[in-house]
Amino acid sequence: VKIHITSTQLLVGSEVATVSSISRHVDTDLPPPDNICSLFQLENGCAGVLVFAVKSRSPKILWRVDGTKGTVQIERGVDGGKHGYQVLFSNESGECQKTFYPFCGVHEELKAFVHDMVQASKDGDHKAEPRSSYVEGARDVAVLEAMLESSAKQGAMVQVKKF
């Protein structure tokens, strides 16, 4: 779920402010929860939804943000035998662009991490990739914690802690 939170905030350029979530635990071989559905509002006022249902009869990973300039929807899927993300962007005029991005795991993140470690060992003043910072990670975890707290409160709206 963390990568989906990061992606949403990166794509839209705004942090998640509040969430309302429901989660379930279906597969006892996995730690709970294994399904979560969240409505969220970003600090810029845009609303969105995150569906992360990995253990259901129809598994789905989808997130969508609706804003004043259009809608972005990202769904995990398969295209031409490759796993990846289908991205739909509908602008204010209703025109829709579809793009498929093959899934590459965390290769780019690992490359950035190794690069930062090598540079830091050479130069004590090296600034790491900002998206790899502990603050960014803590922000993502705060969103996930708010989702779980909301679910424990039967979907009550929860404010995301700020860092």
Image: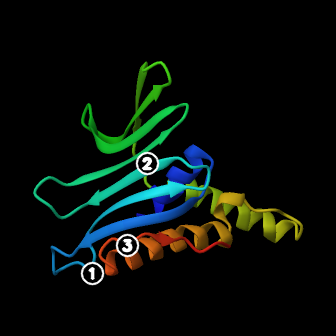
Residue drawn at x 23%, y 78% as measured from the top left: 30
Q: Residue 134 placed where, x, y %?
A: 66, 72
- Marks 2 and 1, how far apart at CA: 25 Å
Residue 15 lies left or right of residue 26; in this view the side is right
Q: Residue 19 placed where, x, y %?
A: 45, 65
Q: Which residue is mark 3?
A: 156
Between 44 and 26, the one lying in front of the other is 44
Quarter occupied by the N terminus: bottom left
Foreground label between 2 and 1: 1
Residue 55 lies left or right of residue 104; in this view the side is left
Q: Which residue is mark 2?
A: 104
Q: In the rendered structure, which amino acid carries the disc numbered 3?
A: Ala
Q: Determine whether the residue tagged by mark 1 lies in a helix, strand or loop.
A: loop
Foreground label between 1 and 3: 3
Residue 51 falls in image quadrant: bottom left
Q: Is residue 38 above or below residue 11?
A: below
Upstream in the sequence, badge 2 or badge 1?
1
Q: Determine whether the residue tagged by mark 3 lies in a helix, strand or loop.
A: loop
Residue 118 lies left or right of residue 98; in this view the side is right
- Marks 2 and 3, how far apart at CA: 35 Å
Q: In the rendered structure, which amino acid carries the disc numbered 1?
A: Pro
Foreground label between 2 and 3: 3
Residue drawn at x 38%, y 76% as measured from the top left: 148
Q: Which residue is mark 1?
A: 31
Upstream in the sequence, badge 1 or badge 3?
1
Tags 2 and 1 in contact by the CB under 8 Å rule?
no
Q: In the rendered structure, which amino acid carries the disc numbered 2?
A: Cys
Tags 1 and 3 in contact by the CB under 8 Å rule?
no
